[in-house]
Image: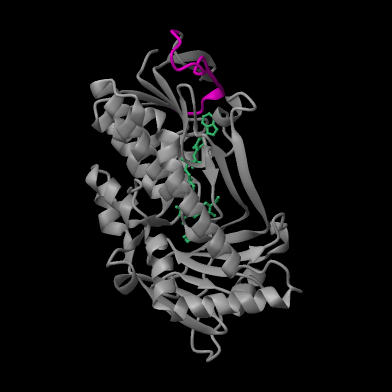
Amino acid sequence: MRTQVGIVGGGPAGLLLSHLLHLRGIESVVVEARSRQYVEDRVRAGVLEQGTADLLTETGVGDRLKREGMVHYGVELRFGGRGHRIDFKESAGGRAIVVYPQNKVVADLFDARLAAGGRIFFEADDVSVHDFGDASAQARPKIRFRASGQPQEIECDFIAGCDGFHGICRPSIPGGALTVFERIYPFGWLGILAEAPPSSDELIYAYHERGFALLSMRSPEISRLYIQCTPDEDISKWPDDRIWQELHTRLATADGKWKLTEGPIVQKGVTGMRSFVVEPMQYGRLFLAGDAAHIVPPTGAKGLNLAASDVLVLSRALAEFYASGRKDLIENYSKTCLRRIWKAQRFSWWMTSMLHLFDADNAFDRRRQIAELDYVTSSRAASQTLAENYVGLPMEPVN
Ligand code: RFL
Ligand code: PHB
């Protein structure tokens, strides 16, 4: 089988890339290791930057997002038993975030691709990539895999590695061609999905001496909540009652007036936290995008948004190549993306460092964190910095 762009991975990055390429008249085939159901049921991100939401809307996959997405013009930082609102209207030029779950983004993209006759292989086994190394060579890149037990080969002009952090594309690039920048944090998040109306209209990021807690949501009926835990926390030690108890403690206000609404917990899991970037994000005719190239700790809510900006840059570079033969945008793909990625890395690291307990015995660090939170919530300049980054820097770097 032949196509222009072979895409490994049918998560948000791969599907959005396929969709954007289609709108520019470029053919692609998506090869996904899992079933559609599995990908759609995976509980992941919840926050879209304004730019990501606009991109989905402008490219025709925003109908449900418009109906069901919850537009938020602020977030709360809670510490010392008090809430402090960061107002995006005032601090981020009226821009906002949209709370809309990643699984719905993925489902909307699947629907759009399949309705437009897009080709997606699900449950592909033994996926491998070949002949992508030399951008000027005659041999065309290939994706090989097995689907329903049958060997398949896709020959293409370019391969997009959108197969997430544990995918095969990044490790297929010869050792020595890539440099890894990484930081692993000494904690993780225990996340739950609960059938309980969110106890706040906006997200609450809470700093507490027992550790960080986050109140988020998926819909007016479903809450998404997280607590800081150890990176290898044993979930079996966390019966529902213990989770609620910890959430009540960490989110409590000093006046006792704020109430956390409980409900049946329908999903729970532990996520490790890391910051990771690989440079460059391309090798010959293989381009890495999304989590395949970088990971951020979830505190800044940036992962999905970075996946979207990567594939926007890549789709424009490929469109320019096919339209005019211009290669400079493709050659600069990694450089263009990395400018935005490093700013999101910085922001995610900063939010993480400000809000988590690193070392319970380090009183200096805790005083410093409180001072930082106090500063961010009382200085106009500092709250503006948080707001501007949280709602999202421009999707493509501005010179
Ligand atoms: P994905 O979503 O991991 O998709 C990769 C796809 O590739 C498939 N795959 C393969 N396919 C073929 N062959 C192989 N060998 C393959 N290996 C893997 C996988 O099955 C999968 O379908 O990466 P992508 O597309 O780059 O998207 C990235 C986002 O999923 C990720 O950055 C976000 O979920 C991160 N994230 C958040 N991002 C936000 O922007 N806002 C948030 O609020 C937010 N919250 C979160 C998050 C991630 C979390 N976890 C679980 C890590 C909260 C959490 C708890
Ligand atoms: C979520 O709703 O899952 C979520 C929200 C904000 C974050 C991370 C995750 O920073």
Image height check: is 223 above or below 280? below
Q: Residue at x 40, y 12 (%)?
A: 1
- Direction bottom: furthest residue: 255
- Direction right: furthest residue: 361
Query: 195 left or right of 96?
Result: right
- Place of residue 287 in the rendered image (x, y in percent of width and height, measured from the top left): 46, 29
- Place of residue 217 in the rendered image (x, y in percent of width and height, measured from the top left): 44, 64
Say which quarter of the image contains residue 81: bottom right
Image height check: is 32 above or below 325? below
Query: 361 left or right of 289?
Result: right
Q: Residue at x 45, y 36 (%)?
A: 334
State yes or no: residue 184 in magenta. no
Q: Residue at x 34, y 52 (%)?
A: 394
State yes or no: residue 137 in magenta. yes
Image height check: is 173 above or below 249? above
Q: Residue at x 44, y 46 (%)?
A: 339
Q: Nearer the viewer, residue 396 or 8?
A: 396
Q: Main secondary structure of the magenta part?
A: loop
- Place of residue 72 in the rendered image (x, y in percent of width and height, measured from the top left): 34, 67
Residue 233 visible within the image: yes
Find the magenta span and give its range: 121-138
